[in-house]
Amino acid sequence: MEMENETKEERVSEWSELTRECLINILSRLTLEDRWRGTILVCKSWFNAFKEPSLHSLFNLDPHFDSPPESTHWWTPEFDAKIDSMLRSVVQWANTSLTEIRIRHCSDRSLALVSQRCPNLEVLSIRSCPRVTDDSISKIALSCPKLRELDISYCYEITHESLLLIGRNCPNLKVLKRNLMNWLDPSQHKGIVPDEYLNGCPQDGDSEAAAIANSMPHLEWLEIRFSKLSVRGLNSICQGCPNLEILDLSGCANLTSRDIVNATSSLAHVKDIIKPNFYIPRSVFHTERYGHWNLYDERFQTDVFRI
């Protein structure tokens, strides 16, 4: 028994006495989950190595949200606080080397620190963040001029004013994803996303389109799924963003096939236009609120309501 204990102690000693360079090399080969759930708990020297700035230039939690079913727990302030805590730690450890952030359900509290400490940020993806507002995004716009990709999908407290600031202050922006939830058939989100949030879907599609058109001339990839923009808004985007290659208009219910063809005919570099392609629930079709669907014979030209 005594010899067995000595062997264990020797093994612990050997691992803890690895040089910092060796530890950093080991940690760099591990997944993000393995680092956070295992290595930082080994001993003090491992934790110190874990805080090496080069290990935190990228912070991507998206895979951990994509695999399990969406949870009501994700939409609570308590969950936001946990994500905020992780992001604040990464920002501090990265020491200005952080260039890519892909997370969800953070809040203004952590993004305020990002705007202060991440001048080299190039990618910011913060989908499904009900407590991110114009306040933090405006600070990001003013402090992160190297931004080239922004995903603010399902962030309903962010308005066209932030889009305008981002466009004017981030000249390298090439990718913008501003997708909304399926307001035509919200059943896929029902019981998970709070009702008051689902009902708060932004109405100002043309205001957002104008902000994009007037400030993002170098945009190449634009996703605005389920936006409520009209043909006027689409025309302004196509005129103001002549370099568009990818344009995703899935679920944009106010656009006809003819509208899209006419508006996008001026895009010389376009490679893929994803048109509205959805089934209209009978409950939506018969409600007075969506009476414009009576024009379906013009908008939907195949037997399964496709454009």
Image: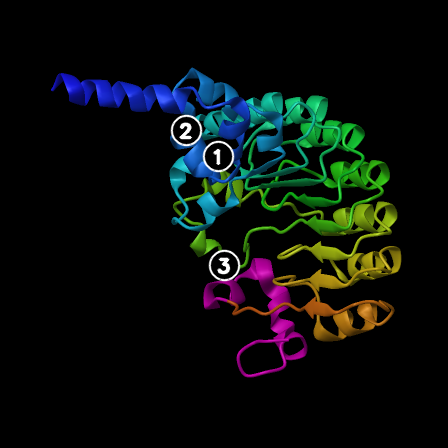
> In the depicted view, which residue is nearer to us: 98 or 181?
98
- From this viewpoint, is residue 101 visible? yes
State the extent of the magenta-drawn residues as a range: 281-307
Q: Is residue 292 magenta?
A: yes
Which element is circle 1 on?
Answer: helix
Dot 3 or dot 1: first in sequence order is 1
**Badge 2, how many Cα within 10 Å: few under 14, some, many 20+?**
some
Residue 260 sits in which quadrant?
bottom right
Which residue sits at x=87%, y=55%? 240
Quadrant the C terminus occupies: bottom right
The circle on residue 194 is none
- Give me the residue at 85% from left, 39% from top: 168
The amino acid beneath tag 2 is Thr
Dot label at residue 26? 1
Give the mark nearest the N terminus, 2 or 3: 2
Q: Amino acid at mark 1?
A: Ile
- In front of the other: label 2 or label 1? 1
Q: Quadrant of residue 118?
A: top right
Residue closer to the observer: 119 or 136: 119
Q: Which residue is mark 2?
A: 39
Where does the image place residue 174, in percent across and percent down from the top left? 77, 50
